Image (cartoon, coloured by chain):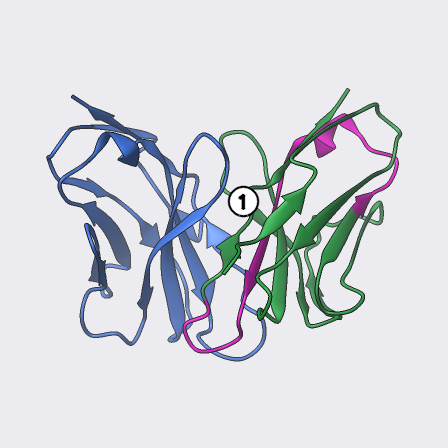
Amino acid sequence: DTGVSQNPRHKITKRGQNVTFRCDPISEHNRLYWYRQTLGQGPEFLTYFQNEAQLEKSRLLSDRFSAERPKGSFSTLEIQRTEQGDSAMYLCASSLSRNQETQYFGPGTRLLVL
Amino acid sequence: AQKITQTQPGMFVQEKEAVTLDCTYDTSDQSYGLFWYKQPSSGEMIFLIYQGSYDEQNATEGRYSLNFQKARKSANLVISASQLGDSAMYFCAMREGLTGGGNKLTFGTGTQLKVEL
């Protein structure tokens, strides 16, 4: 049973550039979550998918952010026109919808916007 | 108001000793779940233990146990027989609603645990 994987692990970009991150969940998991974690804070929810449907988005997710999960498997998170404030760790988690729904996290993508 | 409060930014414990990491939460839901995750310096969040609001017994997973006091809205993590590898950031998290539509986690600010020889 492979865990959640995320690529790239690190990304350095210049302000104004677009970046895209990928998350591959645990294979049988139907739910996929994106979180953002800044230094010294706990992760904050961004958005989540059940299969291919995006069911909830945080108000943290500005219109520069878009996420997709086209076939209900892997997901991408794109940030357009990056700003320095976007520098953070972006964490993906997946779960199986059931009573004790435990989210399992990937290793994260560290983004630095210069 | 903070939904999850972790008042200990840092904790030290000697190897082989037990340590308690505090977590209090705030919710008006009757059904909720409480989680603890460990985050080593590599960044990955590792699931440790879960407690449902209707669970009558405290959850245990190996050296981890959760001291759940519902009336006080606290869910403290107890790590017994600490090991050097336990040094990490520990996060308490809550999911409001036990079943049904997608349940995001709300995290506290974490406690940095350092295990010393």
Q: Is residue B93 left or right of residue A69?
A: left
Up-down relation of residue B71 to residue A18 (above or below): below
At x 28%, y 36%, the residue is B86
User: Residue A99 placed where, x, y %?
Assistant: 43, 77
Q: Is residue B112 visible?
A: no
Q: Which residue is mark 1?
A: A43
Count of number-bearing discs:
1
Q: Chain of mark 1?
A: A
User: Residue B69 placed where, x, y %?
Assistant: 20, 61
At x 58%, y 71%, the residue is A28
Residue A80 belongs to the span the image colors magenta: yes
Q: Is residue A20 visible?
A: yes
Highlighted magenta segment, given as a residue range? A78-101
Outermost residue on the left side: it is B17
Which of the 4 image quadrants contains residue B101? Answer: bottom right
Image quadrant occupied by the C terminus of chain B: top left
Badge 1 crowding class, 10 Å Cα cut-off, few under 14, some 14 to 19, many 20 or more, is many
User: Residue A5 placed where, x, y %?
Assistant: 61, 49
At x 55%, y 42%, the residue is A107
Camera-side residue: A106 or B99?
A: A106
Residue B60 belongs to the span the image colors magenta: no
The secondary structure type at the circle numbered 1 is: loop
Outermost residue on the front side: it is A1
Q: Colour of chain B?
A: blue
Chain in green, by letter, is A
User: Residue A85 placed where, x, y %?
Assistant: 72, 30
Q: Amino acid at mark 1?
A: Pro
